[in-house]
């Protein structure tokens, strides 16, 4: 199971990173906090203080076409907010 899908790089997450040393990741919906913590520590070599997770249910989407209204959902996902210990950072742009 691929636990970490991708890091979330939004303005809101950037503010969390600057103020509270927190980072956000999209993770597999079956992963628990212990697995997420182990995966991030192994991948980035940092020490994690806390892991908070939340599940997002996909929004219901409707659009009108020639054949009539078509309904569907956007994908559901799980987000993890990681709090690092003081003095530690994750540099996402080091491998570019």
Image: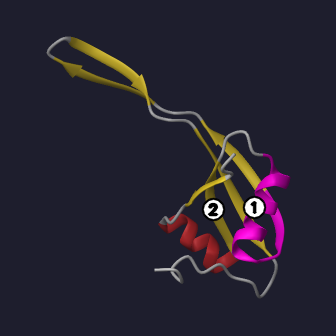
Q: Is residue 33 magenta?
A: yes
Say few, some or many: other residues with alpha carbon within 10 Å of mark 2 (under 14 / 14 to 19 / 20 or more).
Answer: many
- Disc assigned to residue 77: none
Q: Is residue 46 above or below residue 73?
A: below
Q: Residue furthest front?
A: 1
| Quadrant of res 69 | top left
- The spot of residue 48 in percent (x, y) is 81, 70
- The spot of residue 25 in percent (x, y) is 62, 59
Q: Which residues are magenta?
A: 32-51
- The spot of residue 12 in percent (x, y) is 53, 65
| Numbered disc 2: secondary structure | strand
| Marks 2/1: CA–CA distance | 14 Å
Q: Which residue is mark 1?
A: 39
Q: Which residue is mark 2?
A: 24
Q: Quadrant of the N terminus?
A: top right
| Quadrant of res 6 | bottom right
First reached walking from the N terminus: tag 2 or tag 1: 2
Q: Residue furthest bottom?
A: 87
Q: Is residue 94 above or below residue 64?
A: below
* Discs 2, 1 touching: Cβ within 8 Å: no
């Amino acid at each position: 199971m691929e636990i970490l899908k991708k890091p979330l790089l939004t303005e809101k997450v950037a503010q969390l990173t600057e103020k509270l040393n927190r980072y956000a990741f999209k993770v597999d919906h079956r992963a628990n906090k212990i697995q997420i913590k182990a995966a991030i520590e192994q991948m980035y070599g940092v020490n994690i203080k806390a892991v908070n997770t939340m599940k997002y249910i996909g929004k219901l989407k409707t659009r009108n076409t020639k054949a009539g209204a078509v309904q569907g959902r956007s994908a559901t996902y799980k987000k993890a907010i990681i709090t690092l210990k003081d003095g530690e950072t994750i540099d996402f742009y080091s491998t570019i």
